[in-house]
Image (tube, rainbow, N blue to C red):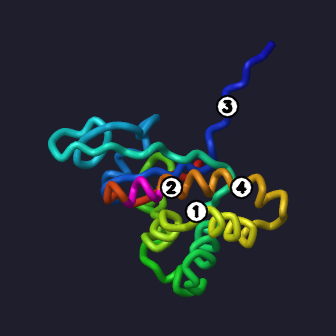
Amino acid sequence: MTHRRPVPAAFVYYAAVDDLAALDLVDLRVAVGGTGPGHPGGDGPPARRFPRPVFTDRVDPVLRCSRLEELLTARTHAEVAADHRSARALGPPDRPGPLVVTVTRGLQHALATATAADLRDAVAASADTDRAAWRDRPDVHRLARLAREALAADLLLYCRVRA
């Protein structure tokens, strides 16, 4: 019997203090439960607990997140796209490692404050098919939980994109 290694998720959403800390975190296997001012294992007060990342192959940080933000906030596509944190790639283009993109504060707040019905409706409206909406709903609910925990801890959201 052959054992296959699981393929890593295409997208990993996680929380960090700022853009530099987000780049530091991208190479860590687990960015959960650590303490410190910038990242797990960081030195110095204040101690901070980082929310559990969300691993998904379903919620693209460019297309799907912008559509979810449009639906949850009633902002237009142009307004979402104009936001300086709308899927902005971090770091220099020649930086080795996975791509890290920002998630807007508008989407973070909308996900954090959305009701279960709001999330269900937004997932259904942003999916290509009913079956896709059914499959995607748990990932969006986990992303909403991450957004709530990050907002409560005054953290920003980021997404690591598998190359």
Residue positioned 84% across, 57% down in the render:
131
Residue 74 x, y percent position in the rendering: 58, 83
Label disc, if present, on residue 44 of the rendered structure:
none
Mark 1: secondary structure: loop
Q: Are marks 2 and 4 in contact (CB under 8 Å)?
A: no
Check the image and report above or below for 26 versus 18: above
- Please count the marks in the image: 4
> Which of marks 1 and 4 precedes in the sequence?
1
CA gap, disc 3 to disc 1?
22 Å
The residue at the far left in this view is: 44
Point out residue 12 in the picture as x, y percentages from the top left corner: 54, 48
Q: Residue 136 carries which label?
A: 4
Residues 116 and 87: in front is 116
Hey, what amino acid is under mark 2?
Cys
Residue at the disc numbered 2: 159
How would you classify the magenta stretch by its main secondary structure?
helix
Residue that badge 1 annotates:
61
Magenta residues span 147-151
Residue to which mark 3 is pinned? 6
Q: Are marks 2 and 1 in contact (CB under 8 Å)?
A: yes
